[in-house]
Image: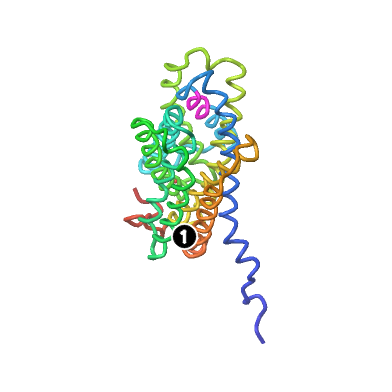
């Protein structure tokens, strides 16, 4: 007689596969809401000032919640944290400089090319390139309306943000293997705050201390940084870097849906088709790219990622 304890439970296995996907989607949804709040800060403190507030508030919240232990880590571990923090600071700083110059939809469309490029490099199967190409087609179609108002500097900032987004994915995954819970994220956010704060002070000055700026900065920190980055770090422990990169291409689709529901921005048939293409690509990438079955130490992006070597 077969021992029922040895029979795999399909429902539990499917739930395990979908959990990291749910975490990423929840994080991206929080970011879209936070972006609406962040837009209110631009006239008040500017792009650099808003980034400084976001990083500082995020660091304070995460350090208070996680209370990370600072002893017992190697130089390699701290190098990962410094790289992670620099990636966070650069990714956010470049993105909001892009938003200050080109439409948000175009900036997000160009930025997501970074994770999409990573998905092609990280994919173990030829089909991963197909999903990436399908998602790229949807992203391009979605942002087509805003691509007529581009500037060279805006495009450069957005592409730079995309490159740093790819670095963030790899650094976050490394930090997740070296530090427990969200400790690595909290420490990296502190590094990002130290880097961003002088730039924000130079740009915004005393406006950063206005009560409304501090309150909005806290809201943006929670919605755009603390909550989504924590969820993504947890998801990356059970989701391959390639599948995660393509899954993040849902960002422009969620932004369009948020614009429709919150800002009453209508969706054209072409935009709805774009959303459908991206959703299909993300679903296919997660189904065929694998999630949960492989340990982070067995993920490759050019070279093997090893626990204890060198999120």
Place residue 264 in its image quadrant: top right
Instruction: Give the residue furthest to the front.
Output: 269
Whole-percent x, y for residue 282 in the image: 51, 56
Say which residue appears at 44% left-offset and 45% top-offset.
Answer: 112
Q: Nearer the viewer, residue 252 or 286?
A: 252
Q: Which residues are magenta?
A: 50-56
Whole-percent x, y for residue 60 in the image: 55, 29
Say which residue appears at 48% left-offset and 41% top-offset.
Answer: 184
Classed neighbour count for the residue bearing mark 1: other residues with Cα under 10 Å, few (<14), some (14–19), many (≥20): some
Q: Is residue 48 above or below residue 69?
A: above
Place residue 80 in its image quadrant: top left
Count of marks, rendered view: 1
The residue where tag 1 is placed is 295
Q: Quadrant of the N terminus?
A: bottom right
Say which residue appears at 48% left-offset and 21% top-offset.
Answer: 46
Whole-percent x, y for residue 287 in the image: 52, 64
Place residue 153 in its image quadrant: top left
The colouring scheme, among rainbow, by chain, secondary structure or one colour, is: rainbow
Inspect this view and state whether residue 195 appears. yes
Is 51 inside the magenta-drawn segment?
yes
Is 7 inside the magenta-drawn segment?
no
The residue tagged with tag 1: helix, strand or loop? loop
Inspect this view and state whether residue 191 appears. no
Q: Nearer the viewer, residue 228 or 288?
A: 288
Q: Nearer the viewer, residue 239 or 139?
A: 139
Say which residue appears at 49% left-offset and 35% top-offset.
Answer: 104
Whole-percent x, y for residue 131 in the image: 44, 59
The secondary structure that dominates the magenta segment is helix
* Direction from residue 258 to residue 299 in the image, left or right: left
Instruction: Give the residue furthest to the bottom.
Output: 1
Instruction: Give the residue furthest to the top.
Output: 206
């Amino acid at each position: 007689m077969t021992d029922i304890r040895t029979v795999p439970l399909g429902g539990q296995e499917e739930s395990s596969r979908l959990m990291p996907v749910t975490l990423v989607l929840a994080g991206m949804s929080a970011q879209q809401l936070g972006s609406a709040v962040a837009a209110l800060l631009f006239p008040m403190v500017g792009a650099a000032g808003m980034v400084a507030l976001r990083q500082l508030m995020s660091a304070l919240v995460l350090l208070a919640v996680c209370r990370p232990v600072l002893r017992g880590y190697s130089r390699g571990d701290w190098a990962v944290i410094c790289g992670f923090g620099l990636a966070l600071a650069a990714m956010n700083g470049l993105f909001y400089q892009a938003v200050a110059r080109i439409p948000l939809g175009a900036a997000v469309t160009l930025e997501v090319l970074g994770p999409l490029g990573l998905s092609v490099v990280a994919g173990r199967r030829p089909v991963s390139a197909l999903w990436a190409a399908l998602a790229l087609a949807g992203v391009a179609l979605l942002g087509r309306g805003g691509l007529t108002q581009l500037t060279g500097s805006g495009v450069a900032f957005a592409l730079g943000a995309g490159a740093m987004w790819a670095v963030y994915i790899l650094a976050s995954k490394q930090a997740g293997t070296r530090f427990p819970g969200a400790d690595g994220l909290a420490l990296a956010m502190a590094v990002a705050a130290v880097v961003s704060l002088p730039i924000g002070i130079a740009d915004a000055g005393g406006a950063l201390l206005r009560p409304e700026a501090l309150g909005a900065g806290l809201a943006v920190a929670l919605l755009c940084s603390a909550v989504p980055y924590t969820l993504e770090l947890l998801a990356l422990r059970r989701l391959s870097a390639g599948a995660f990169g393509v899954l993040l291409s849902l960002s422009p689709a969620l932004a369009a849906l948020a614009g429709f529901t919150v800002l009453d921005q209508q969706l054209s048939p072409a935009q709805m088709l774009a959303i459908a293409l991206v959703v299909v690509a993300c679903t296919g990438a997660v189904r065929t790219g694998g999630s949960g079955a492989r340990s982070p130490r067995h993920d490759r992006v050019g070279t093997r990622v090893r626990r204890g070597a060198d999120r």
